Structure formats: structure tokens, C-alpha cells
Amino acid sequence: MTLHLVRHGRPLVDRTRPAAEWELDPAGFDDVWALRESGRLPEDAAWFCSPEPKAVATAQLLTEGDVGIVEDLREQVRDSTDWLDDHDAVVRLAFAQPDRPAHPGWEPLATCRDRTLTAVRRILDVHAGEDVVLVGHGTAWTLVVAGLTGAPPDLVRWAALAMPDVLVVPPA
């Protein structure tokens, strides 16, 4: 069993709405289709995704099969519509201080970690022995990889994630 964590494709940014409401940018569909054709994802797997529109649309472009939508796979809750010129620096602050909101309206990363890791472990328990593909978000997946491997969050890898991209977690 191998876990494939797919970061969604490029979103259509709408500064008037929280990022959780953003749709997938049609200009980025080719990138998602390229991932589908790349051979990096298993043909036979259990598929699940975050409920966020950009994640659902990415999953629908990646597979013809059924995709379960799991509420707890959503990204770190960021209800603010504040535009942050240095978004990466604020996310890095969230990783450095996971028990505190890094910005008003943001969920503490410890809460995001606990929620997503619990959901992922539940999915893996139900689908033991199967490949699993989860489509979601870079920050949440960075926390999941750290939680499953016991390593600290890899912020270099987080910063390098493309849209879309895949993190592969081999069987433990």
C-alpha cells in the first residue's frame, strides 16, 4: 500500500473570497491532465479529496473513478480574505508556532494537523493493503507526511510543491 498525496491544481484566485472557496483555474487544466498521464499515480486505488472546489475539480480531472469527499481533508482554515504579500512567511510562522493562529482568521496548524492526520489514518485503516490517493492541499499534506513519518515538517519540500504535485508516502 502506498499513499499518494496530491496537491490540487492552480486555483483561480478571487481576493474577495476565502481561499477555501476558490475554483480550479481552467488555464491550469493541462497541468492536471499532464499529471494524470505521467504514470505517477496508481491506476487502481481508493480516491478521496478535500471538499474545497479546487481539490474536487482536480480529483475529477485525475480519475474516472469514484472520489469520496472527506470534510476533514480540507486545508488549514483561513477564513480571512486579507491579501498577504508575503503569504509564505505567514505560513512559515504557522509552522514555527503551530498552537497559535499565525494570522487573524487562521486555524492553528496543530488543529489542522490533528484533523487531517486523524482523517488520513481512518482512510488508511479502512483501505489497508490498497493504494490510496488523496487530493488536497500543500500545507495539510506537509503536516500529514510529518505525522506519518515522525519527521519534522519539510518546509523546503512544502515551498517547492507545484500545482498540482504529488507527495508519496511508502508503507510504514
Image (cartoon, helix red, strand yellow):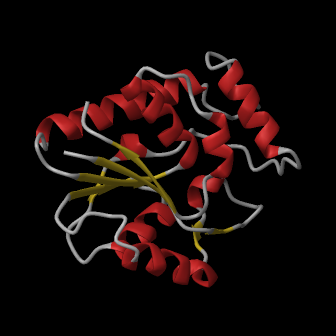
Residue 131 percent coordinates (x, y): 20, 52
- As drawn, 24 above or below 163: below
Answer yes or no: is residue 102 visible: no
Query: Quarter holding the N terminus?
Result: top left
Left or right for 102, reference 155: right
| Image mark count | 0
Q: Horizontal and vertical percent for residue 60? A: 35, 73
- Residue nearest the viewer, comparing 139 with 81: 139
Residue at the spot 42% in from the left edge and 20% down from the top edge: 150
The outermost residue toward the right is: 85
* Picture residue at 73% right of the left edge, 32% below the top: 92
| Residue 33 rendering spot, x and y as whole percentages | 45, 80
Look at the picture and state if 40 lies above or below 105: below
| Residue 165 visible, this orientation | yes
Closer-to-camera residue (77/40) = 40
Residue 71 as seen in the image, left or right of residue 159: left
> On the picture, is 109 further left or further right than 52?
right
- Residue occupying the point 81% across, 47% down: 82
Q: Residue at x 48, y 42 (%)?
A: 141
Q: Left or right of 156: which side holds 128?
A: left
Residue 145 on image: x %, y %: 44, 34
Which of the pair 30/68 is nearer the observer? 30
The quadrant of the picture occupied by the C terminus is top left
